[in-house]
Image (cartoon, helix red, strand yellow):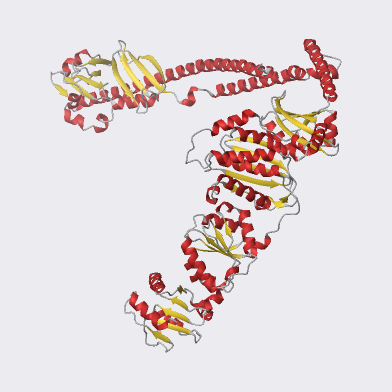
Amino acid sequence: MASVSLKRQFTRHSGFAFTLIGLLLIGILWATDFAARQDQAEQLLKQRALAVQVNFSAYLDRAEFEAKYLAQQVGKEGDLDSLFQLHDVLFFGGLDFFYVQLSDGQSMLDPRSRLYTRDALNVLSNKARLNYWMRLTSSEGSELLVFKKVLPVDDVGRSKGYLYGFISLDNNLALSSDLMSGADVDYMRLQDLTGKTLFEDTLPRLDDETVTIGHTSVLSLPALVDKFKVELKLIQPLSGSVSQWFLLACGAVVFGIALLYWSVQYYARRWMYRPLSSMPTMAQKSNVSFEEFEPLIAQMNRFQTQLKAGEQHLHLLLDSLQSAILFCDESARVTAINQEAKTIFPDYGVAKTIFDMAPLDFHQPIQSALKGDFGGRFELEAEHVNKIYEWLTYSFVNEYGFRGVMLVGRDITELRRLAWHIDNLHPNNALDRPRPEPEVLINEMSLLDRDYDEVDAVRPEYWLRAVHGLLSALSNQAEIATSEQTLGDLFIEQLETVGRIFHLSSGQLAEIELGMPLTAATRKARWSSDHKCLLQIALLLCLNGNMAGRRLMIDWQVSKLTISVQGASEPTPILAWLLEVLPKLVKGRVFYEGSGRITLLSTIEPIGADEDNSGLAYKVVAFIENDFYSAAKVKALLTGLNIELDVFGSFDEFFHSSRAQLVPYDGLLVGVGDQSKAEKGISRLITMCDEASDLPLLYVGDVKQEDPYPRLPHSHLFSYGMLRALQKVFTRPTINLVEGFKREQQWLLVGGSALVQAVWQTELRAQGVTARKEPDMERLEANLGFSPQTVVLLLDKHTAQGLMTLDLPETSVVVTVEDFLERPDFIKYFEVGAALPSADQVADLCRRFKT
């Protein structure tokens, strides 16, 4: 049933109502402001229309003044040329052109008239009225205003004629400029009363998308016979669309609505929600209650009474049982505990969680139950009450939706006592020794009843032999060893046992990747036959199916032995049965963690202190790789043991190295890769050492023939196996090659390029001479004393010149292949004739100087 918050609903609905009211008020304010602004705009445009009328009237007055002035000038001068000399009047007045009709029948025509119309002006002027402006339309459609003025009278008092002034309404920039600037509008259109457009002008900033306000009025002037309609438009800016008082009014409305909304929420919380939240305790804390809450309070009191009664029944039931029962929440805090459990855990009152008051064996099952595992089972001995309990874990979901744990401990002390008596009186009928059901054996045999595949690493008959050995060991009472043994030795012993059963080579067993810390492998204990079976089962899990990709992790923390198999296939029926029964015999359990990971746990206390291996840091070991394919693993193991390590690719590199002549090695590890090269190198090493049978020599890998020196099989390439092998090697004397080199002639190559030195080394080796490169001239003088006779072969004259200052022993023979003028007598010259020597030249050199 989904829960609904009244407070959230009231807040949401009331907020919607207040928002709607605020929007409605803002809308009313906007409508009022819009009407006021429209009225203001109408008044403004009326004023602008009046300004248009005034400017238009002023323009006509200026044109009328020009016409009167021209009429006077015509009456005085009487010719057209004199009129056009009046530039200030003609070009700055209001008339566009004029026409003069004299009384004697002659006329004067303004040349500018042809710019506006092709009609005869005498015909157009017939429609003009005296002293009034009248609208005319030419045959081309041009709109004109004409003004008729009488010329001055002559001497006899007769009029000389009439002057007609014309104003064009088409593209009249002067008129449009006066009207637009005077009215300060962005658009103007002049029409007659029938709607015909006479004049239209627009500012460039006005386009079709611009928001404007408009006004149309009738233009009526005293001097104008016709009436016109004028349409005005004015751009309305964005700031003008909303008035300032409207914004202030909206702010006041928003503030008022928000204040009112907050007041409603505050008083609703104070007078409604607070009493509702305190309703469960209102009846106990106060004698006054709200009438609306009384039915709910009565029902809640009834439920509380029933809940208390149920809790009392639960506690009575828990205390009446002879089992120890605990309840824990999702944080492992104890929420309920009965009397039997209180006797087992006396510190329950001060412990924050069950981990604080329970032994380590409790931790893993509780953690698994909190993750959702159901039906975990383990045994625990409570020494302070002298009882043994079998514990079961059950996972459940509490009232808050979180996972909790219930632990039920059953007292099996009497059962274990009876079983012990039966085991001692009748060992063959021991009750606690497991025996598989016939169905398990039948299912196991059905899996083995198939055609043998040569690709498989395990043959069925070998598998049956291993299963028979395990079942035989489990059927008898466990035998505890009388002497102490390290975990590493125990593992090596079981690994070799499994290898013999399955006829597996050391290389095949090495396919199982092993991880075992040295601190765990060196701890000792008195192991039982059940512990040996536990290790064999772990190895069988690795051998079940293809061994590639199997990883075996072994660790021993305090008293907790952990064996984890990663990448395991699904166990066979007999393996599944062994995984179920065997951990119980060693006070442990098994966990199936998914993705092929199976973890076995056992409880056993170590004996004695941890082994001190700090002395390994002072040991110096040489490792000759000799094409050994696991050389990288050997180097990593030696580095992990904090041993000073020198690595050589081959015996030739070892014998040619200056460090091998100066450093006494505590051990020499030889990788069994190219075995023929290893035998030759060891043979030479034996001839150079006095105590050849007692060399600190260790073969790393699988040696085929028998040899007096110790060996480290491929399957023992892990930290403890390396440690035990080195401890045997370190009991022997160190290897010191200085004395060995003193007994044989020493050849040194000095100078020259790397290519030249390599060619000389190759050619000398073909003659049976081992030549060593000496790149450091400073160490050359010290190295010359290691042999009764040393042949120093100088490969360039620059090196020979630098050698002249050294103090060389008399037993040294110095030979240069490049002659120079200042060569002393003790440096002999051997002519090569080319940059690289030939085989014959090298043979001749060896005959002359080799002893």
Kindly identify the residue that appears in the image at 49 percent across and 65 percent down: 679
Q: For this view, does 499 lie left or right of residue 385?
A: left
Nearest the camera: 265 or 210? 265
Q: Is residue 622 left or right of residue 472?
A: left
Task: Please tell me which residue lies in front, 370 or 166.
Answer: 370
Q: x, y (%) of residue 738? A: 55, 75
Q: How many marks?
A: 0
Coordinates of residue 410 in the picture (x, y in percent)? 79, 29
Q: In the displayed structure, would residue 318 be above or below residue 137?
A: below
- Residue 343 occupies quadrant: top right
Along the viewing direction, whichever of 673 and 631 lies nearer the viewer = 673
On screen, residue 641 versus residue 352, left or right, reads left
Q: Quadrant of the N terminus?
A: top right
Q: Residue at x 31, y 21 (%)?
A: 200
- Residue nearer the viewer, 505 or 517: 505
Which residue, as the protein is rendered here, is positioned at the far left? 105
**Which residue is depicted at the point 62% across and 34% down?**
574
Q: Residue 394: in sight, yes or no?
A: yes
Q: State the residue at coordinates (21%, 33%).
A: 85
Image position, residue 851 (x, y; %): 45, 82
Left or right: residue 246 compared with residue 274: left
Residue 588 seen anywhere in this rendered image of the structure: no
